[in-house]
Amino acid sequence: MRYPTKQPHARARSWLLASSLGLAAVLSGCASGPGANPRDPLEPYNRAMFSFNDAVDSAVLEPVATGYRDVTPTVVRTAVTNFFANLGDLWSAVNNALQLKGEGTYNSVVRFTTNTVFGLGGLIDIASEMDIERHKQDFGLTMARYGMPAGAYIVWPLLGPSTIRDSAGMVVDWQGNVVSSINDVPVRNSLTGLRIVNTRANLLGTTSLVQSAALDKYSFTRDAYLQLRENATRSGDEEDETQWMNESAAEPAAQGNGK
């Protein structure tokens, strides 16, 4: 498998996001006002974009993810989750190294090597069974490590919640993503689609919990995302999004049921 230094689709995607970041920075300054949430100065735009994303999710992604979950055995879905998490360990190793974190770098390399060699290409998480801790990192956290503030909260079309810093980090994360570097377009797109659907299937329980608790879905998603990233910045490691979101949604749901 060859990994080119730069691909046309990656350049176009990076240019588009970089241009959008500049626009978001301008809008952030214009949207600030006495009643604005300091963490969410773009709230009117963000709520509109959240509604758009939620409509797309309800019409397309959630039904597909539900069907995928219903027809795919749990052991297969677990293997798919492990496979993409294993690829993530490779990128985490790079970011741990950039942050000069020796233990995180070592563990990430050992995890990737162990699961790739002995776990059928990452389908089985042997490393976790050996108590080799995962130190999940991305370039947004690398920038945070060196003092870059998160900036305004922003919701991107289809990509969902982010911040100005994390949006810039996504450009680098895309370049470092092994799947996005695959030359074979059908294979690359198939793997990307599988990752998205599998991730959404893992979050189906969260959707039900949020809806049953009658929460403001926008505020919940925003606050959960910002808290998740703040925790990751403080602790030095990114938490598992699926587990954390499920736990966060379960708390208000339990409180609502107890009333």
Image (cartoon, rainbow, N blue to C red):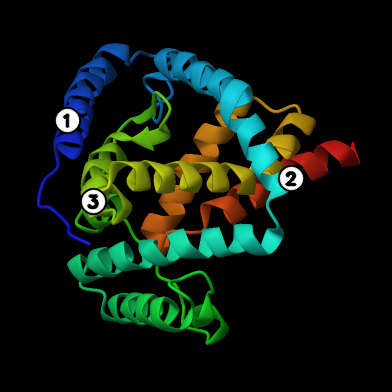
Q: First in sequence: mark 2 or mark 3?
A: 2
> Which numbered disc covers residue 181?
3
Q: Locate residue 167 relative to residue 193 in the image: left or right.
A: left
**Residue 120, image x, y percentages:** 47, 76
Q: Residue furthest left?
A: 5
Specify the quadrant that holds the N terminus: bottom left
Residue 150 appears anywhere in the view: no
Q: Which element type, helix, strand or loop, lies under badge 2?
A: helix
- The residue carrying mark 1 is 12
Q: Residue at x 23, y 39 (%)?
A: 168
Q: Is residue 103 visible?
A: yes
Closest to the observer: 74 or 141? 74
Q: Residue 127: x percent and y percent?
A: 48, 81
In this rendered view, identify the residue nearer to me: 242 or 125.
Answer: 125
The residue carrying pointer 2 sits among few (fewer than 14), some (14 to 19) or many (20 or more) residues within 10 Å by Cα, namely few
The amino acid at mark 1 is Ala
User: Horizontally, is 226 left or right of 254 in the view?
Assistant: left
Above/below status of 258 relative to 43: below
Look at label 3 and name its amino acid: Ser
Q: What is the C-alpha distance between the residues marked 2 and 3?
A: 31 Å
Closer to the eye: label 1 or 2: 2
Q: Earlier in the sequence, mark 3 or mark 1?
A: 1
The front one of 211 and 26 is 211
Q: Which mark is residue 70?
A: 2
Amino acid identity at mark 2: Asp
Residue at the location (37% across, 75% down)? 112
